[in-house]
Image (cartoon, rainbow, N blue to C red):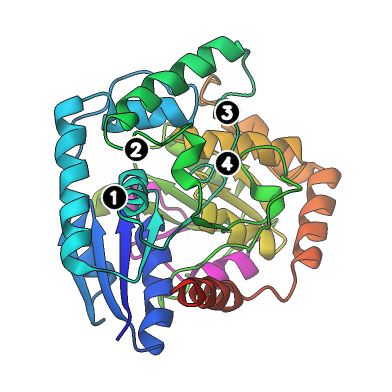
Amino acid sequence: MTSIALANEMGGGWGHLLTLRTIAEAFLQRKCRITLLCREAEKARCAFSGMDVAVEQSPAWPPRFTGFSLNFAQSLWRNGYRDDEAFDAHFAWWSGRFRALKPAFVLTDFAPTALLCALALGLARGAVGTGFTLPPPTTPTPFLHPWLEVSDEALQQADDRVLCAIRRRVPALRSVAGIFDGAARFLCVFPEMDHFEIRSSERYLGPVFGPNFRHEPPRQDGAGPRVFVYLSAANRCLSDILGYLKTLGFPAIGHIRDLPECQRKAFESPTLRLSGPLMNLDRAAAECDIAVTQGGLHTTARMLLAGARLLICPEQLEQTLLAYRLNQRGLCEFVSCFSEPKTVEQRFDLAASSKRLGKNAGAFAAKHAGYHSADTVREIVDTCLRAV
């Protein structure tokens, strides 16, 4: 039986785990033995419930520095590579587990230390990811804030600092981008959803969707464009956008993650209904004209595939960069982290009225009509097993 190690080391939310879950299902159908090593083992056991997958807790990195990362290299530094003692412990742990498990292939999703250890041990390896977690393989690694200016020297300094830390364990590594050298790269986004400039030299496979939720969207009442809202309770635009939708009286439904029941009821109106459990996103996408989200990649992809107009209210850098690129490409309106929360009302009006946005969303849906995530998963699994 072929042994496959799946790894997730950094990042939060459910996106990484649900992507790996979908890929794990395909490996299991090929009679492979699967071990998942990840930073959020309890959440993973929930996501992989009922599957024949061994889940192991990987060590946690120290708390992150405040401030923002200039590039992928500095993101690694802030996530923990700055701490030599912790880095040594993590490198030893991943190396020890791979020696014990003897996987035929190591497939990672935002797990750079796992990739480095697999490289050092000579294991076949690959990385699935978005544009953000699989940046273009350039030196220095590219800037994460295209709305600002930065010198190449500052980016190179960020790379050099991380590379110095890595070379203590993998002396032969020549660049931070070299973390991915020799690894199969699975860029699981549409080209229009790349966080960087569209890459002519790399193949876009399309997103890997996790299992859809069975809960059906509530009924929409009211006149006007149908609106779907998917934000977290911590989103700074939440109160303003829900209040504005109540004032407009548009038929609106949504799910607010981590919102207490009492607050959910207080936000509702005859035309605005909020679901407690997360609803079927494909159905919600098909039935809405405008989607207000925080810029999760898979939710965004589902909405664009349905031709919905997008208003993105990002909460962190990865979402902000995606929103910025989509806005550049005429596929969304967004409220930047530098804008006042009240700006969301103006941006919503633009999303609702822009002929250009509607046309581009329709063109995106037509271009990618017939896309099947299962085809992407099959290609990933076939590539990994051919390498074995």
Q: Are marks 4 and 2 in contact (CB under 8 Å)?
A: no
Residue 59 in picture, x, y percent from top left: 16, 46
Which numbered tag is attached to residue 234?
A: 2
Q: Secondary structure at mark 2?
A: loop
Tell me which numbered mark, 1 or 3, is placed earlier along the sequence: 3
Which residue bears the numbered disc 1?
258
Whether label 3 touches label 4, CB < 8 Å: no
Q: What type is the residue that disc 3 sits on?
A: Thr
Instruction: Report x, y in % for residue 264.
Output: 33, 51
Q: Identify which amino acid the numbered label 1 is placed on.
A: Asp
| Residue 274, above or below 357 | below
Disc 2, disc 1: CB below 8 Å?
yes
Residue 25 got which mark? none
Badges 1 and 3: C-beta atoms under 8 Å apart? no
Residue that label 4 marks? 312
Q: Determine the residue located farthest toward the front in the rendered image.
A: 172
Upstream in the sequence, badge 1 or badge 4?
Answer: 1
Q: Dot 1: what SS? A: loop
Residue 224 appears in view: yes
Residue 72 placement (x, y as % from top left):
47, 32
Q: Nearer the viewer, mark 2 or mark 3?
A: 3
Q: Quadrant of residue 161?
A: top left
| Mark pair 2, 3: CA separation | 36 Å
Q: Earlier in the sequence, mark 3 or mark 4?
A: 3
The quadrant of the picture occupied by the C terminus is bottom left
Q: Is residue 285 magenta?
A: yes
Which range of residues does the magenta coloring cover?
264-289
The answer to which of 163 and 363 lies nearer the viewer is 163
* Residue that carries the numbered disc 3 in the rendered image: 139
